[in-house]
Amino acid sequence: LEIQEGRVVRVGAEGEPYPSQPGSDGQAYDAEGLLATPGFVDAHTHPIFKGWRSGEFVRRSRGDSYQQIAASGGGISSSIVGVRESSTETLAGLIRTRLDRFLELGATSIEAKSGYGLTVEDELKSLRALQLAAAGHPLEVSPTLLGAHVVPPEFRSDPDSYLDLVCNEMIPRSADERLAHAVDVFLEDGAFSLKQAKRIFQAGKRCGLGLRIHADQFHSGGGARLAAEYSALSADHMDYTDEAGLEVLAKAGVVMTLLPGAVFFLGREHYASARRMIELGGRLALSTDFNPGSSPTQSMPLMMTLAGIKMNLTPAESLWAATMGGACALSRKQDLGTLHPGYQADFCLWEAGELDLIPYRCGDLVPEAVFKRGRLVARRGVRLQCNNG
Ligand SMILES: [Zn+2]
């Protein structure tokens, strides 16, 4: 693999002798015996939060329901309090350690959402903290405003007023300040309706932002048609999307982002119909949905395991979804997600004789080395801080 200025310029043929001279800059990395894959492109994450919510995990294991936990101030409400109480700098420090972890586990680009501030200032603060954390960090971050995550407690009796705030202030300001590339909305009973989601899409489109949607996670709610109609970048979850919905998404070329980590961690059994999506010619991405409530993992290899066991994807299919599929969801299919000449030299080296070993090891296998734009940035699960060739 020959790299110049952070891009792949040549891929040697199998069995071709290793060049006796290092590249023009004199640097070489001997990866003999290792497997190279593109770096993961995790196209759906929520890393802007304060504390973990492990107490809820304990309560759930004792039999408490999600509703009981939410009613006693747990759940998403506790994350909202955490973000509102934190300064931009505090949040940025927390996010930075999470960006390190993504990199260590093999992701070289991610999408990251706000969504735990839920006031104009707290959502903008979240996105600024993300920008601050990502500045100078090797992991590439594509920011998304998720002001329409849930209706915050103070607007529960008047959700449309909150929506006005999102559409008239949050979205235009995050676009003006270049804090977000996309907007997202959670379409679900208890979150936002189809009509409200449409308003978010209209406002996002007016401001020139890309569109994403959380839809059909627990019920089929019409999000597929909406995403297709507005040419959304991605329609995410889609666990309960009906056949007609899958067809319109596939036809419109909207990326369907599979999030099996959330299904698994919530103890549910209804996974997205990934095989049917592929049969219909749909484009799939595979992501962690990393968040403190329903998917507290940053491991893309573990998502490949779940994709194989729960959705019958082959290792090659899940790797594609976790790399090129993610690049499509980020609108970056021209330069991320594969190692062909011209693409960014973002890749992982694995102590694995074959690809199958990555999902088979059930999240245990960590890349031997991670490279971003041709630079070694993590080794055996540890982020490297210095400049390496
Ligand atoms: Zn999500």
Image (tube, helix red, strand yellow):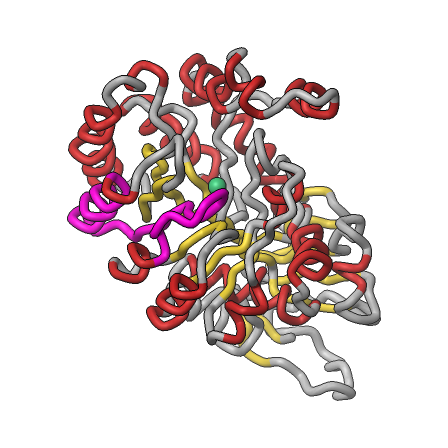
Residue at the image point whose x is 36% and y is 37% from the top: 146
The answer to whether residue 90 is left or right of residue 322 is left
User: Does 329 appear in magenta?
Assistant: no
Q: Which of the image's four quarters has the C terminus? A: bottom right
Residue at the image point whose x is 25% and y is 61% from the top: 229
Q: In this view of the protein, can residue 87 be seen by the observer? A: yes
- Residue 328: give x, y in percent of width and height: 44, 64
Q: Quadrant of residue 226?
A: bottom left
Residue at the image point whose x is 58% and y is 68% from the top: 275
Pick whichever, 94 or 261, lies toward us: 261
User: Does 219 appear in magenta?
Assistant: yes
- Residue 6: give x, y in percent of width and height: 52, 64
When the figure is inspected, residue 186 is found, relative to residue 117, above or below; the finding is below
Q: In this view of the protein, can residue 4 be seen by the observer? A: no
When the figure is inspected, residue 9 is found, relative to residue 16, above or below; the finding is above
When the figure is inspected, residue 129 is found, relative to residue 155, above or below; the finding is below
Q: Which of the image's four quarters has the N terminus? A: bottom right
- Residue 237: give x, y in percent of width and height: 49, 50
- Residue 293: give x, y in percent of width and height: 57, 30
Residue at the image point whose x is 51% and y is 15% from the top: 71
Q: Quadrant of residue 118?
A: top left
When the figure is inspected, residue 149 is found, relative to residue 301, above or below; the finding is above
The answer to whether residue 126 is left or right of residue 66 is left
Pick whichever, 65 or 110, lies toward us: 65
Segment tinted magenta in the rendering? 196-224
Q: Quadrant of residue 192?
A: top left
The answer to whether residue 309 is left or right of residue 206 is right
